[in-house]
Amino acid sequence: MQDITNLKQAEEETKHLESVLAQSQKMEAIGTLAGGIAHDFNNILFAVTGYSELALGEVEPGSQVHTLLEQILTAGIRATDLVSRILTFSRRNETELRPLQAGPLVKEALKLLRSSLPSTIEFFTQIDSGLENIRADPTQIHQIVMNLCTNAAHAMEDGGGTLSVTLTQVTLTESDIRLHPGLRASDYLKLVIQDTGRGISKEVIERIYDPYFTTKQEGKGTGLGLAVVHGIVTAYGGSICAYSEPGKGAAFNVYLPTIKEEALAEREAAISLQTGTEHILLVDDEPDLVDIVERILTRLGYRVTTASGSLEALDIFQKSYDEIDLVLTDLTMPKMTGDRLAMELMKINPLIPIVITTGCGLNLTDENIAAIGIKAVIPKPVPEAELAGAIRGILDAE
């Protein structure tokens, strides 16, 4: 009997290990797939954000067109952050949290959301001023607001109603936290998203944060939204509670712990662009991206020679390496990748500064960068000011 028991136990352990291995292989495959998608999607986003920035410089500040272009640029930047979050999830990396002000992020998310709401839904917001900071990831705060508001809007899509969003600061006492398991007596930001839709039954509320649980029709949603929100909020040391009566709407209360630490300064919208007159060799196999970056660099004062691939760039450099001050190249290209191109170029001129842009950078480690001698790796899509600052800084250091 003991031998049979040991055999069964060994079989169960083997099955468990096989399951763990299968899950690991699945996550690795997802990571590879996500990296490929991220590269292509970031190239598309680079076109959106790049042309938006170029167009902003051509229209009158404060005009309606300028405002609309700013909205396009903001949405593109948030989409870029979301791609980064997908990559982070697929690779199981830890999210980098930092002190920030939640109010402006909530307002920004609502501004993007408002234009997509049907006219049958009224919008009410109250974002208090003077709120303390929280430690969070800005894209995740954006996700929380967008997910909860989108669900609220769906609950009112048939008959319309009112979507109410408030952000206040509250102090929870020892008696208060009895209603909020997992929280401690302290100060919190309280985000309330309330609708006047069809409501949620008690049975549904009990399962509402389960992954893939959804009451939506097929094709209307995956059920992952609230599970993601719940995961983010609990990871921050907060809590989320749902209250509802069928036929009377629903409210989601999100509590996020505040901190005394100052928020990091955000990048100034109107920043003085750093310019130059040097000669740059620009390499990318995507024609749209070559066009955008060439326009940006030319506007900054640089002389630009373009190449549509690594082999063309290598040929140009061999003929005129002494006239080129910096090479800006994509990483993922056919026939020869950007890092391989960098090695070939440095055989011709070991002192040439090389900057690589990438939509994913899956196979480029810090060790590779240092060994090759690459000066910088810039993720796509890159804001004009960031690109200008990076290039100027590298050229000035030479």
Image (spheres, grey):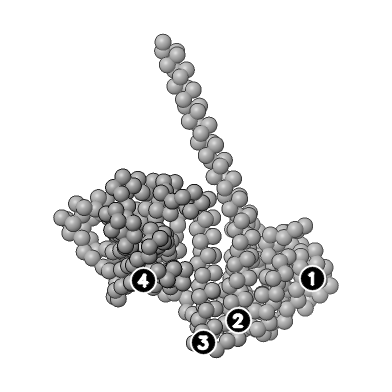
Distance between the alpha carbons at the discs numbered 1 and 4: 58 Å
Residue 251 occupies quadrant: bottom left
Disc 2 or disc 4, which is closer to the eye?
4
The dot on residue 63 is: 3
* Contact between labelled residues 3 and 4, with CB atoms less than 8 Å apart: no
Residue 186 occupies quadrant: bottom left
Q: Which residue is mark 2?
A: 55
- Taking 392 as reference, is 145 above or below it? above
Of 154 and 293, nearer the camera is: 154
Disc 3 or disc 2, which is closer to the eye?
3
N-terminal-most mark, 1 or 4: 4
Disc 4 or disc 3, which is closer to the eye?
4
Q: Which residue is mark 1?
A: 317
* Contact between labelled residues 1 and 2, with CB atoms less than 8 Å apart: no
Q: Which residue is mark 4?
A: 123
N-terminal-most mark, 3 or 2: 2
- Taking 210 as reference, is 145 above or below it? below
Q: Residue at x 57, y 47 (%)?
A: 30
* Contact between labelled residues 4 and 1, with CB atoms less than 8 Å apart: no
Distance between the alpha carbons at the discs numbered 1 and 3: 44 Å
N-terminal-most mark, 1 or 3: 3
N-terminal-most mark, 2 or 4: 2
Q: Position of residue 281 (x, y in %)?
A: 73, 73
Q: Residue at x 53, y 65 (%)?
A: 79
Give the SS element for disc 1.
helix
Q: Residue at x 47, y 76 (%)?
A: 267
N-terminal-most mark, 4 or 3: 3
Give the SS element for disc 2.
helix
- Which amino acid lies under the numbered mark 1 shown in the image of this protein? Phe
Q: Position of residue 111 (x, y in %)?
A: 43, 73
